[in-house]
Image: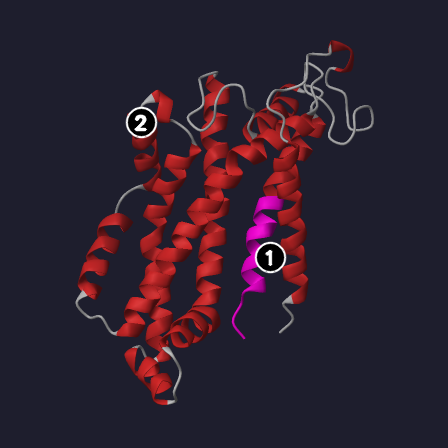
Amino acid sequence: MNRRLPAAVALVLMLALAALVALAPEHLSPIAQERAAAGPAALPPFGADGRGRPLLEYAAQGASVVALPALVAGLVVAAASIFGGVVRAMGLERLDPVISAASEVVGALPRMVVILVVALVLPREWRGLMPLALTWALLSAPGAMDEAAAVAERLGGARFVEALRAHGYSGARIFLVHIVGYNLRPVLVRQGAEVMSQVVFLEIGLSYLAASRQDPSFTHPDSLMSWADILYLGYTALAFREPYDHAAILGLGLLLLVSGFASAIGRAARAR
């Protein structure tokens, strides 16, 4: 099984996202009406908006909005996967009913309704993508834990651990290398990457809704732009024949970048 190609693709896409974050300006460039709606040829690499401001700055600020919350949410879900798998491998039967009950309760909650309630309940000074990303991660964690526990169960659970101990392996090697590294790795990497991409799409959806209604965003300060603003420009190009076709292409390209990263890193972490 060749993992080098998807790993290389994931690395390239990750570096592209990191470059956008590094290029993110604190404020957009001044308005320049002489280059309003300029295309990529007139203002490389992505063109300009209706006020002559580079769409590269939109893309960079949008990446800075989603990067850290998405990463934290992915790590939380990956940690939950590890916990679920290790609990099943250790044979801690007393925790299984508690985890199952929590999974059923959390799994029954409508995620978007919970996200909107959290967004509305939070004080204005606490509003941002991070609380919403953590909420989404907590709602996604039970499914990841169940899948990891199923993998550990297929290994043999506590019998697998005892067999390795009988061969003289230390606890650290058993759990960190054989259980997490060799067997749980595909689950925790894929689940973490999927939640990262879901947080990005969640931010885009909430920001697009706010932009369409001209309301303040729940996910970022008004001084920053989101990828949803690029997609909104692209929508106006398609719906009202405005000269923003380059914005639509850029917005779709950013979505493909995030989806491609999640898919590539999941394939790179596949089991043998």
> Magenta stretch: residue 8 in it?
no
Q: Quadrant of the N terminus?
A: bottom right
Q: Amino acid at mark 2?
A: Leu
- In magenta, the rendered stretch is 257-272
Helix, strand or loop at label 2? It is: loop
Residue bearing mark 2? 122
> What scheme was used to colour the molecule?
secondary structure
Residue at the (61%, 20%) spot, across then down:
27
Q: For residue 98, say whether it is visible.
A: yes
- Whole-percent x, y for residue 177 in the image: 45, 73
Please state the total of marks drawn on the protein image: 2
Q: Image height check: is 32 above or below 156?
A: above
Q: Residues within 10 Å of mark 1 (few under 14, many from 20)?
A: many
Cα gap from disc 2 to disc 1, whole angstroms:
35 Å
Relative to 79, is 114 on the left or the right? left
Residue bearing mark 1? 264
Residue at the (44%, 45%) spot, across then down:
72
Mark before the other along the chain sequence, 2 or 1: 2
Residue 238 in which image quadrant:
top right
- Whole-percent x, y for residue 22 in the image: 64, 36
Helix, strand or loop at label 1? It is: helix
